[in-house]
Image (cartoon, rainbow, N blue to C red):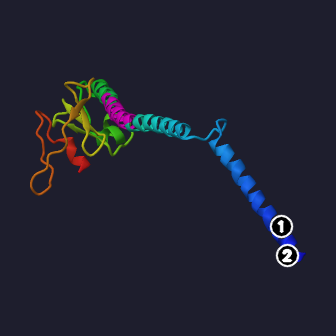
Amino acid sequence: MNVFRHSLKARKEQFAARKSELGLRKAVFSQQGAIDLASIMVGVIVIAIVGGIIAATVFAVIPWAQKEAGKQALGSVKEAESVAFAQYVANTGEGKYLAFSDLVSGVDADGIDSLIQASESVDVAVSADGSEYIAVSKVSDTLRFYISSDNPNTPVEALPAVKDAKGDPVVITIPSVATAPDSAFN
């Protein structure tokens, strides 16, 4: 009798296992089931499209924002140079542009206050007599923008720094401007 109970119990367990397997099989292969290959493929395609749009947006927006920040920094330099020139005219009767270090620290002897915040990505070179300037904004290792006293309103994209065979930067001579501001970035 004990053997009979044991075999009956085993048969009940087998029947329950088959029943649950059959129920799972019905759910998976049923016409009412929500899981099928087409649904999975559509879900994967939708996720890929959304991910692609997000990635493209991020990779397009970051360089654009960096370029605009570089141009904005040059706009600040242009305004600071305009104020410095006007203050020199008011104080001495003669206009003069200032190097970046003077724009940052101010020239107290001539009554010029600090006009711009310090930045490692911007530099300004001024001619010996202060009549002309060129400002460079470093956006990345390969991209720079510049403005000059001749064309202060439109930042121009500059070529990357030229280096000689030793790897030293080549100094670019700009008419009336003693040194190229590119040396501050190397």
* Marks 1, 2: nearer the viewer: 2
Distance CA(mark 1)–CA(mark 2) = 10 Å
Q: Which mark is residue 21?
A: none
Above or below for 122 versus 186: above
Under mark 2, the amino acid is: Val
Q: Secondary structure at mark 2?
A: helix
| Frontmost residue, 32 versus 148 | 32
Q: Which mark is residue 3?
A: 2
Residue in view at x 68 percent, y 44 percent? 27
Where is residue 184 shown, x and y percent of the image? 24, 47
Residue 165 visible in the shown view: yes
| Frontmost residue, 132 versus 42 | 42
Looking at the rendered structure, the number of numbered marks drawn on it comes to 2
Residue 115 visible in the shown view: no
User: Horizontally, is 155 left or right of 116 in the view?
Assistant: left
Where is residue 88 shown, x and y percent of the image? 28, 28
The quarter of the picture where residue 95 lies is: top left
Q: Is residue 75 magenta?
A: yes
Q: Earlier in the sequence, mark 1 or mark 2?
A: 2
Q: Residues within 10 Å of mark 2 (few under 14, many from 20)?
A: few
Under mark 1, the amino acid is: Lys
Where is residue 73 shown, x and y percent of the image? 35, 34
Residue in view at x 72 percent, y 56 percent? 18
The quarter of the picture where residue 126 lies is: top left
Q: Secondary structure at mark 1?
A: helix
Above or below for 141 versus 32: below
Above or below for 166 versus 175: below
Check disc 1 and report the residue beneath it.
9
Q: What type of secondary structure mainly makes up the magenta span?
A: helix
Q: Residues within 10 Å of mark 1 (few under 14, many from 20)?
A: few
Tell me which segment is drawn in magenta.
Answer: 60-78
The residue positioned farthest toward the right in the image shown: 1
